[in-house]
Amino acid sequence: MSRQPEVLWAQRSDKVYLTISLPDAKDVSAKSEPEGFFSFSAIGAQGESFSFNLELYEPILPEKGKVHIGLRNIICSIHKEKKGWWKRLLKSEEKPAPYIKVDWNKWCDEDEESEQSDWPASDDDDDGDEGDESDDDDGLLYLPDLEKARGK
């Protein structure tokens, strides 16, 4: 009988990330089908078998999916067929299994994603107002301008 590893999930408008906590995994197999079926299996460090099957909320693009096997976990990037935000990870409206949890470290809300995608572009519009220190309400730590400090 196989066990289920802890699975953390997060999403963007175009993809879903699954982080599978399984250190030193061997024989990793992650398969997906366009209808939204995702299956995973691997052998743990002590030789025990791990596996799970998910029926995702909406269809996906298996050919664009990627799997990265790290020392401590396996990260699966699953592309959504249609861009948009899912209400939940699974098609079923029942409470998900206890081994499936939200990955708050990778989580991004809809409004945050658009801010992040705009961020590099808005960095280019230099209005010459370098001395303005009043906009540090965005949660960033204030760091003084070392060039100005050196000149004093």
Image (cartoon, rainbow, N blue to C red):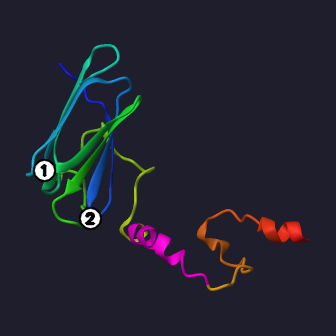
Front residue of 114 and 124: 124
Q: Note whether residue 94 is visible.
A: no
- Region of the chain picked out in magenta, as a range: 113-126
- What residue is at 10 percent from the left and 46 percent from the top? 33
Residue type at tag 2: Trp
Task: Say which quarter of the image contains residue 59.
Answer: bottom left
Q: Is residue 148 left or right of residue 95?
A: right
Q: Is residue 110 left or right of residue 139?
A: left
Asked if the stretch drawn in magenta spans residue 108, the answer is no
- What residue is at 24 percent from the left and 67 percent from the top? 84
Residue type at tag 1: Gly
- Residues at marks 2 and 1, CA–CA distance in whole angstroms: 15 Å
Q: Which residue is mark 2?
A: 85
Q: Is residue 114 left or right of residue 16?
A: right
Vertical side of 62 occupied by 131: above or below: below
Chain-order first, disc 2 or disc 1: 1
Quarter of the figure with the N terminus: top left
Q: Note whether residue 118 is visible.
A: yes
Residue 36 tag number: 1
Asked if the stretch drawn in magenta spans residue 124, the answer is yes
Can you name the residue that lies furthest to the right here? 152
Front residue of 67 and 85: 67
- What residue is at 60 percent from the left and 81 percent from the top? 126
Q: Secondary structure at mark 1?
A: loop
Vertical side of 117 occupied by 26: above or below: above
Rendering coords of residue 152 (x, y %): 91, 71
Can you name the residue that lies furthest to the top here? 46
Task: Say which quarter of the image contains residue 80.
Answer: bottom left
